[in-house]
Image (cartoon, helix red, strand yellow):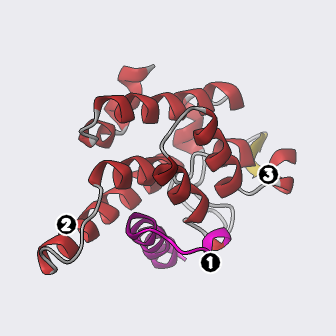
Amino acid sequence: MTDELLKSMPEFGSIGDADLREKTITVWLEAMREAGWTFGDLEKMPFTLLISGTPVNLVAHTLAVTRTARAIADELVKAYPGRLSVDRDILLSGALLHDVGKMFEYARQGERFVKSGSGELLRHPVSGAAFAYKHGLPEGVVHIIAAHSKEGDGLRRTVEAVIVNHADFVNFDALK
């Protein structure tokens, strides 16, 4: 399953720290397993239920957010040398996992995706952060997951969390 994940989402290989890379991959695969999804399901799963009939799936959205976040980080570091630092591995791990909780938030009814019972109680930033914490990811990654959406609006976000938050909304708003 790891090979299939890396084939569809090669950005996991961009995480330099081997331990963090493995934990990030494990969280994604364990979320799929625990929630009962296959790669085929994820190709059909919309990245949001808020845009009716969106053709963009969860994997494509996750890749776009990760690539957008990486580009923002690269530009900021280049624009402000010595004044701003970004932990690239934390950023990439957090971007790749920012919507992992959607695997618990969604359920399938025939060909439609709907909110699951769990999703009615806990939105994906909460369930995703809890799942990542359970699997031993660093607090910086857990923070990105928890703070990437409106749930993080009252928090003081790290620079990595600010970047993923904006990368996510750039992608969402552009498609809305």
Residue 154 located within the stretch drawn in magenta: yes
The disc labelled 1 sits on which kind of residue? Answer: Asp
Could you say which disc has been placed on residue 119 in the image? 3
Percent coordinates x, y for residue 29 in the rendering: 53, 28
Relative to 111, is 163 above or below?
below
Percent coordinates x, y for residue 69 in the rendering: 33, 64
Q: CA distance from mark 2 to mark 1?
A: 24 Å
Relative to 5, is 155 above or below?
below
Q: Which residues are magenta?
A: 151-176
The disc labelled 3 sits on which kind of residue? Answer: Gly
Relative to 88, is 163 above or below?
below
- Binning the other alpha carbons within 10 Å of mark 3 as few (below 14), some (14 to 19) or many (20 upward) gives some
Residue lying at the far front of the rendered structure: 82
Residue at x-position 31% and y-position 48% = 89
Nearest to the eye among marks 3 and 1: give it.
Answer: 1
Could you say which disc has been placed on residue 153 in the image? 1
Of 169 and 109, the residue lying toward us: 169
Precedes in sequence: disc 2 or disc 3? 2
* 99 relative position to 52: left or right: left
Dominant secondary structure of the residues highlighted in magenta in the image = helix
Residue at x-position 65% and y-position 78% = 154
The reply to whether dot 3 and dot 1 touch (C-beta < 8 Å) is: no
Of 37 and 130, the residue lying toward us: 130
Percent coordinates x, y for residue 125 in the rendering: 64, 57
Please, what secondary structure does the residue beneath circle 3 have? Answer: helix
Residue 145 located within the stretch drawn in magenta: no
- Binning the other alpha carbons within 10 Å of mark 1 as few (below 14), some (14 to 19) or many (20 upward) gives few
Could you say which disc has been placed on residue 74 in the image? 2
Relative to 14, is 80 above or below?
below
Q: CA distance from mark 3 to mark 1?
A: 20 Å
Q: CA distance from mark 2 to mark 3?
A: 34 Å
